[in-house]
Amino acid sequence: MTTMRELRQAAGLSQEKLAELAGTSQPQINKLETGQRKMTVDWAVKLAGPLGVEPTALLGLDASAIPPAAGRPARPALPPLLRTTPAAPAPAAPAASMPVRAAARGGGDQEMFLEDGPIDWIARPDYLKNARDPYAMYVVGESMMPRFRPAQLLHVNPHKPPAPGAGVVVVKLNKAVLVKEFVRRSTDAVILREYRPADREFAVPLEELDTLHTVVGLQEP
């Protein structure tokens, strides 16, 4: 089975260069290659572009590849026909479609940050045919389970005001992104709810808020 290390080597990248292109660190890349960190949907989306492959290809990798011991030959590079090519520009929008956006973990693996531009395009569902600027977004993380699960694709209407109890995509001014449950607005903050690691309500100050969009549906992976 092809490993992440083989894909990286086939792309002609060092761990340091891949980390730079993916906006992460070399130790994180090493953990993914040696099986110390699981290849999740958010990591697959983050690494697919620099490696020149589709995210689904990364999700099927053998993550147990261990670096060769001293004196033992390294794995051979992939044959020329299997070598990857540089990532292509983002595709143009097809008719009657909406963009798919993605978020990736920050350096501390705690906060999610919105990626620039769409990673894909999908057909609009009927209930968004006449909506303005709808988009889809992958769920990353488990803070909203069981309501939202990793790898589900949320359908978002950015112009529908959220009602109490609605799912929302919150983007802060620093591009950090949260998928939570809307509770209410106060004079100076938006009150949100998450379910894990503990069921709790918390506030995002309005001075930190960029956008607040309503989740209107979802698609299973």
Image (cartoon, rainbow, N blue to C red):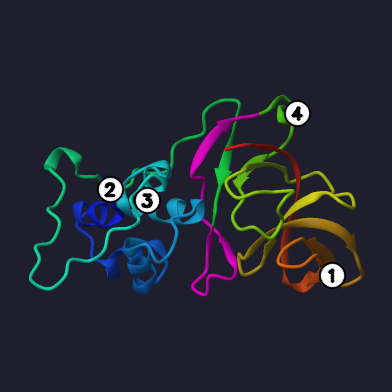
Dot 4 crowding, Cα within 10 Å, few <14, some 14–19, many 20+: few
Magenta stretch, residue numbers = 104-124
Q: Earlier in the sequence, mark 3 or mark 4?
A: 3
Q: In the displayed structure, would residue 55 be above or below residue 95?
A: below
Count the marks: how many? 4
Q: Which residue is mark 3?
A: 49
Dot 2 crowding, Cα within 10 Å, few <14, some 14–19, many 20+: few
Identified by mark 2, the residue type is Pro
Which quadrant is home to the N terminus?
Answer: top left
The image position of residue 179, as x and y in percent, is 70, 56
Q: Earlier in the sequence, mark 1 or mark 4?
A: 4
Q: Earlier in the sequence, mark 1 or mark 3?
A: 3
User: Which residue: 64% across, 41% down?
Assistant: 135
Q: Which residue is mark 2?
A: 86
The image position of residue 141, as x and y in percent, is 61, 58
- Asked if residue 20 can be seen in this view, the reply is no
Real-space Cα separation, disc 2 to disc 3, in angstroms = 8 Å
User: Which residue: 28% across, 52% down?
Assistant: 3
Asked if the residue under mark 4 is in contact with the one under mark 1, i.e. CB atoms within 8 Å, the reply is no
Identified by mark 3, the residue type is Gly
Q: Which residue is mark 1?
A: 189
Mark 4 lies on a secondary structure that is helix
Q: Is 178 in front, or is 157? A: 178
Real-space Cα separation, disc 1 to disc 4, in angstroms = 30 Å
Drawn side of residue 55 relative to residue 205, left or right: left
Q: Earlier in the sequence, mark 1 or mark 2?
A: 2
Q: Earlier in the sequence, mark 4 or mark 2?
A: 2
Q: Earlier in the sequence, mark 2 or mark 3?
A: 3
Asked if the residue under mark 3 is in contact with the one under mark 1, i.e. CB atoms within 8 Å, the reply is no
